[in-house]
Image: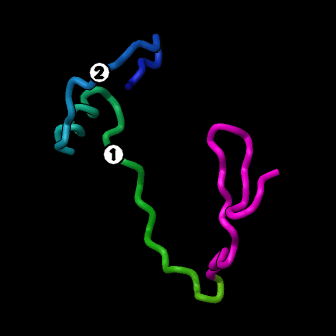
Amino acid sequence: MLACPDCGGRLQIIAFIAQATVAGRILDHLGLDSRGPPLARAQAPPPPELNDPGPSYHGAEPIQFCLRGARSTLAGGAGP
């Protein structure tokens, strides 16, 4: 649900404009920016020696959470 930023009332979508040229003309007519942000140039990926794979979680025990209480337990073990 969309809410009015001024009064908090419910907003309804009355139109969907799918054509970029039509949307641009409407925004230009309203005095709003019809151009998107500038695109950044593509960059090469970092060299393999600088690529950090992150921590390994192989062999770690999964954690189970109870959604009805504040208790959590390790899989296969007793909780606190």
Q: Which mark is residue 12?
A: 2
Residue at 59% x, 88% y is: 48
Q: Quadrant of residue 57?
A: bottom right
Across and down, in percent, residue 54 comes to 66, 75
Q: Secondary structure at mark 2?
A: loop
Camera-side mark, 1 or 2 = 2
Nearest the viewer among 11 and 25 is 11
Nearest the viewer among 67 and 78 is 78
Residue at 46% x, 14% y is: 8
Residue at 41% x, 50% y is: 37
Q: Of the residues shown, which amino acid type is indicated by label 1?
A: Arg
The span picked out in magenta is 51-80
> Alpha-carbon distance for marks 1 and 2?
25 Å
Q: Main secondary structure of the magenta part?
A: loop
Across and down, in percent, residue 18 comes to 19, 42
Nearest the viewer among 25 and 46 is 46
* Residue 62 sits inside the magenta stretch: yes
Observer able to see residue 3: yes
User: What residue is pinned by disc 1?
Assistant: 35
Badge 1 local density, few (<14 within 10 Å), some, or many (20+)? few
Mark 1 or mark 2: whose residue is earlier in sequence: 2
Instruction: Please determine whether, in this image, residue 53 is positioned above or below residue 74.
Output: below
Extreme residue in the right direction: 80
Residue 78 lies left or right of residue 8; in this view the side is: right
Nearest the viewer among 48 and 35 is 48
Q: Secondary structure at mark 1?
A: loop
Q: Which quadrant, please, contains the N terminus?
A: top left
Residue at 32% x, 29% y is: 31
* Residue 77 sits inside the magenta stretch: yes
Across and down, in percent, residue 28 comes to 27, 34
Instruction: Please determine whether, in this image, residue 15 is positioned above or below residue 35.
Output: above
Across and down, in percent, residue 65 comes to 66, 50
